[in-house]
Image (cartoon, rainbow, N blue to C red):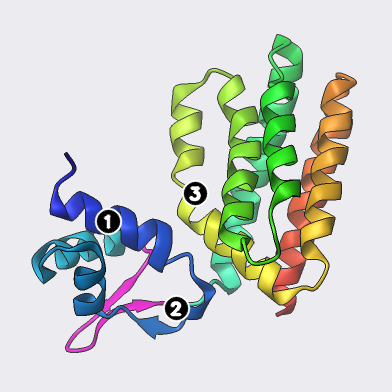
Amino acid sequence: MPSGRELAYAHLKDTVLSDPANQGQFVNEQAVADEIGVSRTPIREALLLLAAEELVQLLPKRGAYIAPVAGREIRELFEIRGMIECYAARRAVELGAVPLERMRAELADQRELGADQAREFIEHDHRFHSALVEAVGNEMLGKTYDGLRARQVRAGIEALFRAEGRRKAVLDEHERILEALAADDAEAAARAITEHLSATQHVLQAG
């Protein structure tokens, strides 16, 4: 059974930090503790871990601040995602290891989600992309990519809220990535990935 700190860490990272409504706000430690049924001590321990990952800012006498996704963080997130995902596309094609069925399943699940299921939509988005990265078989690369998950989810959800029609555009962009991978066209897949990431980055930086 996970410890109180582990429960708090997972809840804060996967639920509290990914909610666009919480950006620019301070974490209510007592409310979070009540929500998951732990004391405030594991909440504070989890916040220390999240601060070390630069996902929250600990301000003296004020608490943990959830800074909005913006500026340099957006640019750096999408730069590193582009490097990893384009490499993964080329390498997976080279190895004959493209996980088409898994990626198609994630896309199909995305299509079934309603407009009020932004978080679930972006979770499937993350799994769509991570399937390709995992297919390369490089554990260190996979761990590096997984370390971006919290920021990726936050950014993805925020983009859906900022741009009307972004949901449909994501589905279409994912389809183009799959078409290129299915054709074993690594360069076309890399271009489609770059265009997809650039579109989300543009939405975030224009907001």
Q: Residue drawn 43% across and 34% down?
A: 143
Return the residue at label 3. Answer: 149
> Looking at the picture, how far across and down is residue 108, in whole percent?
74, 39
Residue 137 quadrant = top right
Q: Residues within 10 Å of mark 3 (few under 14, many from 20)?
A: some
Q: Amino acid at mark 1?
A: Tyr
Q: Which residues are magenta?
A: 54-66
Question: Foreground residue, 176 or 48?
Answer: 176
C-alpha span from label 3 to label 2: 18 Å
Which residue appears at 66% of the width and 26% of the height? 102
Q: Earlier in the sequence, mark 3 or mark 2?
A: 2
The residue wearing badge 1 is: 9
Q: Nearer the viewer, residue 192 or 153?
A: 153
| Cα distance in 3D space between marks 3 and 1 | 14 Å
Q: Residues within 10 Å of mark 1 (few under 14, many from 20)?
A: many
In the image, is residue 167 part of the stretch drawn in magenta? no
Residues at marks 1 and 2, CA–CA distance in whole angstroms: 16 Å
Report the mark closest to the observer, 3 or 1.
Answer: 1
Q: Residue at x 56, y 59 (%)?
A: 119
Please name the residue that numbered disc 2 is placed on: 22
